Amino acid sequence: MTKSLLITGATGSFGQKFISSLISEKNEWDKIIIFSRDELKQWEMQDKFPQEKYKKLRYFLGDIRDYKRLKRAFEGVDTIIHAAALKQVPAAEYNPTEFIKTNIYGSQNVIEAASDCGVKNIISLSTDKASSPTNLYGATKLCSDKLFIAANRYSGHKLKCSVVRYGNVMGSRGSVIPVFLKQLDSNQTLKLTDPKMSRFNITLKEAINVVKYSMQKSLGGEIFIPKMPSYNLNTLAEAIDEKLNIEIIGRREGEKDHEELFHAQDCYELLETSNMYVISNVISREEYKSKWMKNHSEEIFISKRVNAYSSDTNDNFLSKDDLKKLIYEFKKENNYL
């Protein structure tokens, strides 16, 4: 019996790297379906990964706002990685309805189509902006997270849904490092919103590994949150080039000074492994721990943490030298050198 994996938003930064990692390793998937609405990016991806060479790959053009199209795409699919979303914070403030249609209604379409088609598992990708949101993008992603958690309570078909929430992906489309490097290449003044701001950091490779981990460990109804380092924007700017002229332009609309991956209230349902926080939402954390230990050999324990997981109070901060190494690797991988 064939096993099929589908990735929504598969032509984005995460999707392309995730697909690349899957086709370069042995795994259980007989078919990997690339689902996205961007015709040009699909064409570029087919040019990069032609079906003649990569027999597992299938390309499916569609929009998560379209339930009927999703239902057609999900036929025979076992697992879905839901990465499709509108993501730019300032754009959300000026185009709220479009973000609601995609991030909330689109997510509900994914859940309903998956349930109707007999899909077994969904892993939905979230963001640090979904915790205590101060902008519309974060609010839509919090709603999306809640929808996927609630889907585990559906009667009838046993659809298992989990959420993966992590911080800023280093070097992803729209992230700060490519913007800074572009300014550096054109001898522009480096524009900083606020040098005191802090952010969590995760590389694309690390994000992919977190998603693969959650696919293996998911019991349904939980949020997986990797333990990540933080950095200050001022330190990041110095790591890119200490001689750059810096212009402080102030916070963008809806932007936080510091990011948060879960708030203090979440600690009542918080568990930990050596490198992961897990929020159990559907059952108590005591029940979750018991269920985990029956299914996995990796140890998990009830967390003693009582405070929010915020980028400014994180006990793991990247130094300027740490960031220099990460930036060098990013430039090497993306042909900046």
Image (cartoon, grey):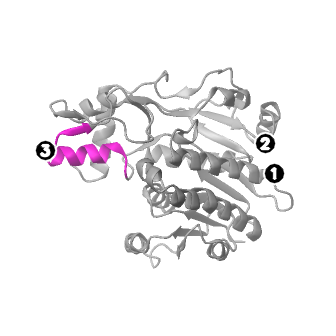
Residue in the foreground of this view, choosing between 194 and 173: 194
Residue 131 lies in the magenta stretch:
no
Q: Where is residue 167 drawn, in percent x and y?
A: 49, 39
Secondary structure category for the residue under label 3: loop
Q: Earlier in the sequence, mark 2 or mark 1?
A: 1
Mark 3 to mark 2 CA distance (whole Å): 52 Å
Q: Which mark is residue 242?
A: none
Q: Amino acid at mark 1?
A: Arg
Q: What's drawn in magenta, residue-wise?
A: 174-191
Residue position for label 2? 282
**Residue type at numbered disc 3:** Asn
N-term mark: 3 or 2? 3
179 part of magenta stretch? yes
Q: Secondary structure at mark 2?
A: loop
Would residue 181 be found to the left or right of residue 250 on screen? left
- Disc number at residue 153? 1
For residue 25, above or below residue 187: below
In the picture of the structure, the residue carrying the numbered disc 3 is 187
